[in-house]
Image (cartoon, grey):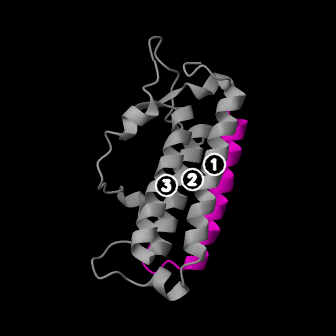
Amino acid sequence: MTSGITHDARIAATVTAFEAAMARFVARIENTPDELAEQSRADGGWNAAGIAWHVALTNEAFAGLVDGSVPLAKTPEADFVETPFGEITALVPDQLEAPEKFHPPAGVTKADALARVRASQERLVQALRAMPESRGLWTVKSILGQISLYQVGDWAIAHVVRHNAQAKRVAG
């Protein structure tokens, strides 16, 4: 363990922070009137329902990495040491273009987006809680560089926080 805390403590802290971030995000989307949440934006950007759909797709992908159903994680090299996640996120540009597979479909409804984002939250929480300690430091190459599966959980938290701020700008 490179962080000095136990596997169980690290998973518990990640799950707690993720669930708190998701609670804030889901509340923001729930409290956005349906018409505004689903309204097309003049600038072509995602509306609040689209942002929620994107978060759900991303949570599902993260869950797949953690539980192995998306088999991209590998055992770490012998000399692998986690880069502190704050250093990783400091390198992320303010504006990122998500890959097409993470874009919401046209016309997604707030109700459908909320249902999917709630299910994706549960799937990721279950994947994190079920992850054995031996898998936590497995690594995956990402747009953020080489990160551990523990850090996939950190990324999920940061991703939700980022898109909660975006939803606030879009929906007020």
Q: Which mark is residue 56?
A: none
Q: Tag 1: residue type?
A: Leu
Q: Residue at x 48, y 11 (%)?
A: 78
Q: Earlier in the sequence, mark 1 or mark 2?
A: 2
Residue receiving disc 3: 161
Q: Secondary structure at mark 2?
A: helix
Q: Which mark is residue 60?
A: 2
- Foreground pick, 126 / 28: 28
As drawn, the residue found furthest toward the bottom would be 35
Is 110 a magenta residue? yes
Residues drawn in magenta: 104-131
Classed neighbour count for the residue bearing mark 1: other residues with Cα under 10 Å, few (<14), some (14–19), many (≥20): many
Classed neighbour count for the residue bearing mark 2: other residues with Cα under 10 Å, few (<14), some (14–19), many (≥20): many
Residue 150, quarter of picture = top right
Q: Residue 168 location, x and y as percent?
A: 45, 69
Residue receiving disc 1: 124
Of the two numbered discs 3 and 1 in the rendering, the one whose residue sits closer to the viewer: 3
